[in-house]
Amino acid sequence: MALIVVADDEMLLTEMLAAVLEDAGYDVLLAAHGKEALDLVKQNRPRLLITDFMMPVMTGLELAEVLRQDHEFTDLPILLVTGAQGAVARRHPELFTRVLDKPYSLQQLLDVVAEMVPV
């Protein structure tokens, strides 16, 4: 199964996303902030990173910048799910593979994930 790391400081949201993604056939690891996600990505080499923009310790933007500077992760697909920061993220196509604006439907998320990482 494809491994996905989900980073968001809203734990109820990440747990719900994990359940939906696992039901769709993905393995999921959760991170409460960007630094934790960075550690998980480096240790586990997921097929996809789903991250929020605004998080404590390290934002989604900072996380993407660090990963893109590491030659081992330049090709890692990064899906940013965000409320107010979508426009900022779209100005950085070199960092984010896709941007999904909140609110989004779970089916919309699953469709985007399936395009990025087939099960």
Image: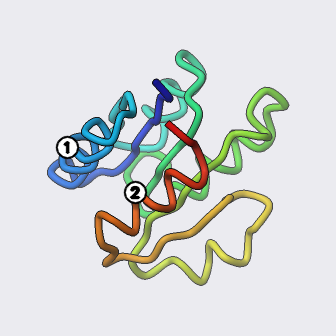
| SS of the residue under disc 1 | helix
Q: Nearer the viewer, residue 41 or 119?
A: 119
Q: Quadrant of residue 38?
A: top right
- Is the Cβ of the residue at disc 1 closer than 8 Å to that at disc 2? no
User: Does residue 88 appear to the left or right of 111 in the view shown?
Assistant: right
Q: Nearer the viewer, residue 77 or 54?
A: 77
In front: label 1 or label 2: 2
Q: Is residue 115 above or below residue 3?
A: below
Q: Is residue 80 above or below residue 114?
A: below
Please report whichever mark, 1 or 2, sits nearer to the chain's N-terminal start: 1
Q: Farthest residue toward the top?
A: 43
Q: Which residue is mark 2?
A: 110
Query: How far across and how far down the image is residue 107, in percent?
Result: 33, 65
Q: Which residue is mark 1?
A: 15
At label 1, the amino acid type is Glu
- Distance from the alpha carbon under mark 1 to that under mark 2: 15 Å
**Residue at left offset 76%, top offset 44%:** 68
Q: Is residue 15 above or below residue 46?
A: below
Query: How far across and how far down the image is residue 94, in percent?
Result: 80, 60
**Residue at left offset 56%, top offset 40%:** 48
At label 2, the amino acid type is Leu
Q: Quadrant of residue 13?
A: bottom left
**Residue at left offset 40%, top offset 43%:** 6
Q: Quadrant of residue 24?
A: top left
Q: Nearer the viewer, residue 99 or 62?
A: 99
Query: How far across and how far down the image is residue 58, in percent?
Result: 49, 47
